[in-house]
């Protein structure tokens, strides 16, 4: 994704690439298709040791950025997740780590330590079912009742919902948002697995029926979590974009190699101008995706005024062209491209997932236009 | 203004001078560049003003930031040019002098010109005294640049040029041209070319303005009849013009990424955004989710395009990408520009077909749509860019040609029986 990595980023990236190459090769991904969790606990714990869940946590709490630009660091990581179609709820876990890291250390320190150590799986329960499923829609209620808070509502899709120990639930208290850490074992929590396109990622619907927890389960302030939720959303968008770009890159590289190796009518596919021009278009989509993904991640780290626009632009573009590019890769492979045996579907699954999560391209195009109006009004 | 002026000090100096001396930029609509809404007199007045702006920048020590001091520039690194561009955001600047005068023309002079040529022309360019044009394309072929038919024949210390060049923007108000001509017909096409420089307004050069389908008269065609060019105005070696030509076209593709080019930072951001919103508003479709979706897409393409050009500019500057990667940006800009024009036309609704002068941003969008493909043609077609990306960036096999390894005079130039 980045043209130039810092030495620390390069070390971190190389360690992750070695680990994923060893622990999550395509054959292992195929085997994990039937695994309920989609990944093994030991894999996640060792990944966490490499720093997978610590980048967005402040240094005094045991985390730390590699470059002073934590969201860019996290994108370097999720790009490699995309390039390897790697298992694990990376985006959700990092959103939770960022939330806990920004909150009162006393109340949530132990969970944060477990998340950073990879010994606990904690996920973010944010999106809600249709018709309240537009990005930013939150209807789940968090009510204060004496020393307790009470949750009522439904969240979906919740990544690794059935395999997490804790959920960071974003709900509504009056006009503001509230975030609560809910153990999946709490009374009133019911979890129903969903089907999904990815081989190793898992999603669930989680229902909260009168779920009652002591008030110190709240992360931050009751009714005042809007800014923190937006920050988590920005992290999720930046990381999902980078993951999709990694998957695009892997599928593209594989298809370019195929075009050189595959001969028809006595010449390589790469010698046909009709196909060369399609590769040129794909290359322009790919470089454009790299460029806007990096630009958006930088803007989040720098707190640039146009960070929200850049994230929506990146999500709309990568969502649209990521899928186009990988479907074109399938087309250029011909029949083998739609078999389970060939690897290209591993990446098609990943870009498909990333397109549909965290707001579709159409939703983000609406956000872009609304942002234009706002910036005109402000000017 | 000392060598190695600190970046922050330079930025401060540029900011103070710009705020004290330049006017805010007039809003430039998305499609204004393609329209012909100025009389020739108004156009000449604008050119004159831009020459004055260039002179003011020169006198303030802000012209030619990355040009060596020996030729009147500032001798500073590209970061300083970027700082100047950022500080110029929202202010007037000599827009028409940037391309092709600074890049590719001045860039080619700096790279291949003799010391004498550089001393004569670069300071004049930096002062706004010389506007340059490219005599590159010919009526016989736009994309096949190396197939130039304009001939240059040696006569003592001079060369005699005959032929025709085309697609020069505003040659009628420009001063000098850089010209690709054929000096040897008995070798393959790439090995018989030579580059010259010459004044445009002289006996033997007839400048003819071409009317485009929207009424624009910006483009010109030139007819060269026995134009005499002294040998000292030759750029590079005789018959080695393609070495110059390859870099010439690279500098052309660099567009706003060239460190020689001054362009206010985020110029697209400031100019295009009101254009898109005004179209939506004037079409009465602010509440139409379909129109809002299209505008979101147009804005997306603009922002992605800016990010892509930045990435490619940095990639080439740092050596992480080859020079040929500039074709990726050219391809994207062409396709995106065409799509944005389609969106504006779509949002305009029936006003795209018939409009009144009171229709605000919608007026003329139909004509702009007729000119849509300009973004995919000008500066090298997107088809050529796709060849460059697939062959030079991805390393795929070259297209078969019938003019390689053949003396150029034997290359077919028309259906057999007509040549």
Image (spheres, coloured by chain):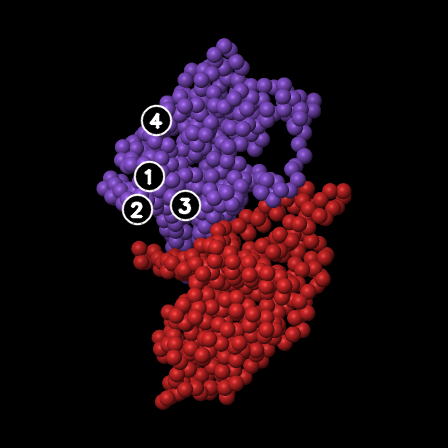
Chain colours: A red, B purple
Residue B114, image x, y percentages:
43, 23
Which of discs 4 and 3 lies nearer the camera? The answer is: 4
Which of discs 4 and 1 lies nearer the camera? The answer is: 1
Q: What is the CA distance from the residue labelled 2 to the residue labelled 4?
A: 28 Å
Q: What is the CA distance from the residue labelled 4 to the residue labelled 1?
A: 23 Å
Q: In the current view of this chain or complex, which residue is farthest to the left?
A: B20
Above or below — where is A10 with respect to A177?
Answer: above
- Mark 4 residue element: helix
Identify the subunit bearing mark 1.
B
Task: Say which residue label 3 marks.
Answer: B30
Query: Which numbered circle lies on residue B8?
Result: 2
Task: Say which residue label 1 marks.
Answer: B4
Q: Residue at x 73, y 42 (%)?
A: A267
Above or below — where is A236 with respect to B87?
Answer: below
Residue B123, image x, y percentages:
34, 27
Comes first in the chain, label 3 or label 2: 2
Binning the other alpha carbons within 10 Å of mark 2 as few (below 14), some (14 to 19) or many (20 upward) gives few
Identify the subunit bearing mark 4.
B
Comes first in the chain, label 2 or label 4: 2
Which of discs 3 and 2 lies nearer the camera? The answer is: 2
Query: Which numbered circle lies on residue B124?
Result: 4
Looking at the picture, tell me which residue is in the foreground, A301 or B301.
Answer: A301
Q: In the current view of this chain or complex, which residue is farthest to the right?
A: A265
Q: Are marks 3 and 2 on the same chain?
A: yes
- Mark 3 residue element: loop
Above or below — where is B229 with respect to B122?
Answer: above
Residue A69, image x, y percentages:
42, 59
Q: Are marks 4 and 1 on the same chain?
A: yes
């Amino acid at each position: 994704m980045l043209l130039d990595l810092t030495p620390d980023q390069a070390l971190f990236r190389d360690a992750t690439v070695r680990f994923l190459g060893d622990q999550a090769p395509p054959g292992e991904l195929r085997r994990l298709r039937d695994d309920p969790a989609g990944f093994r606990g030991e894999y996640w714990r060792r990944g966490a040791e490499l720093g997978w869940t610590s980048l967005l946590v402040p240094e005094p709490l045991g985390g730390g950025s590699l470059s002073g630009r934590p969201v860019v660091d996290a994108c370097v990581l999720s790009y490699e997740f995309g390039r390897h179609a790697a298992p694990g709820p990376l985006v959700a876990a990092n959103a939770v780590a960022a939330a806990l890291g920004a909150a009162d250390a006393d109340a949530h320190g132990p969970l944060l330590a477990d998340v950073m150590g990879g010994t606990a799986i904690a996920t973010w329960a944010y999106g809600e079912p249709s018709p309240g499923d537009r990005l930013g829609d939150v209807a789940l209620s968090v009510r204060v009742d004496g020393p307790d808070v009470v949750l009522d509502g439904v969240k979906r899709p919740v990544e690794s919902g059935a395999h997490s120990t804790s959920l960071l639930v974003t709900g509504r208290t009056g006009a503001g948002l509230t975030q609560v850490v809910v153990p999946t074992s709490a009374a009133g929590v019911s979890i129903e697995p969903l089907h999904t396109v990815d081989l190793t990622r898992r999603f669930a619907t989680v229902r909260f029926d009168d779920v009652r927890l002591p008030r110190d389960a709240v992360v931050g302030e009751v009714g005042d979590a809007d800014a923190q939720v937006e920050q988590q959303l920005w992290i999720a968008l930046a990381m999902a974009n980078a993951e999709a770009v990694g998957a695009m890159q892997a599928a593209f590289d594989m298809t370019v190699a195929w075009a050189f190796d595959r001969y028809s009518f006595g010449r390589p596919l790469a010698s046909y101008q009709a196909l060369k021009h399609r590769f040129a278009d794909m290359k322009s989509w790919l470089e454009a995706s790299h460029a806007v993904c990096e630009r958006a991640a930088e803007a989040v780290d720098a707190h640039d005024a146009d960070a929200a626009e850049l994230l929506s632009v990146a999500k709309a573009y990568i969502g649209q062209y990521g899928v186009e590019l990988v479907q074109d890769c399938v087309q250029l492979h011909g029949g083998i491209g739609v078999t389970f045996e060939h690897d290209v579907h591993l990446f098609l699954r990943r870009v498909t997932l990333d397109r549909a999560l965290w707001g579709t391209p159409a939703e983000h195009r609406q956000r872009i236009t609304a942002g234009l109006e706002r910036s005109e009004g402000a000017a | 203004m000392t060598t190695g002026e600190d970046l922050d000090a330079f930025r401060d100096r540029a900011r103070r001078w710009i705020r004290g001396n330049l006017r805010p930029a007039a809003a430039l609509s998305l499609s204004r560049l393609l329209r012909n809404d100025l009389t020739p007199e108004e156009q000449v007045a604008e050119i004159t003003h831009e020459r004055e702006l260039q002179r003011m920048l020169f006198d303030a020590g802000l012209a030619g930031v990355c040009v060596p001091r020996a030729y009147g520039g500032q001798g500073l690194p590209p970061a300083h040019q970027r700082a100047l561009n950022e500080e110029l955001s929202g202010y007037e600047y000599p827009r028409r002098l940037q391309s092709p005068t600074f890049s590719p023309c001045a860039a080619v002079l700096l790279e291949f010109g003799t010391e004498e040529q550089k001393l004569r022309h670069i300071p004049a360019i930096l002062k706004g005294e010389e506007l340059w044009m490219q005599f590159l394309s010919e009526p016989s072929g736009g994309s096949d640049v190396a197939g130039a038919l304009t001939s240059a024949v040696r006569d003592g210390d001079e060369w005699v040029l005959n032929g025709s060049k085309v697609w020069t923007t505003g040659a009628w108000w420009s001063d000098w041209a850089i010209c690709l001509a054929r000096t040897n017909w008995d070798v393959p096409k790439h090995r018989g070319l030579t580059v010259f420089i010459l004044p445009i307004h002289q006996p033997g050069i007839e400048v003819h303005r071409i009317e485009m389908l929207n009424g624009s008269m910006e483009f010109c065609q030139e007819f060269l009849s026995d134009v005499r060019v002294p040998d000292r105005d030759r750029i590079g070696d005789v018959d080695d013009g393609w070495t110059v030509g390859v870099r010439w076209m690279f500098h052309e593709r660099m567009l706003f990424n060239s460190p020689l080019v001054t362009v206010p930072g985020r110029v697209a951001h400031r100019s295009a955004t009101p254009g898109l919103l005004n179209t939506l508003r004037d079409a009465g479709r602010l509440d139409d989710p379909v129109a809002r979706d299209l505008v979101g897409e147009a804005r997306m393409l603009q922002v992605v395009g800016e990010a892509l050009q930045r990435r490619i500019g940095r990639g080439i500057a740092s050596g992480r990408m080859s020079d040929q990667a500039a074709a990726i940006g050219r391809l994207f800009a062409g396709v995106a520009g065409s799509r944005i024009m389609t969106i504006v036309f779509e949002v305009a609704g029936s006003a795209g077909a018939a409009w009144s002068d009171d229709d605000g941003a919608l007026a003329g969008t139909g004509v702009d749509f007729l000119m849509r493909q300009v973004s995919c043609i000008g500066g090298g077609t997107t088809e050529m860019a796709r060849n460059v990306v697939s062959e030079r960036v991805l390393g795929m096999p070259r297209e078969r040609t019938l003019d390689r390894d053949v003396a150029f005079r034997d290359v077919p130039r028309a259906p057999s029986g007509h040549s």
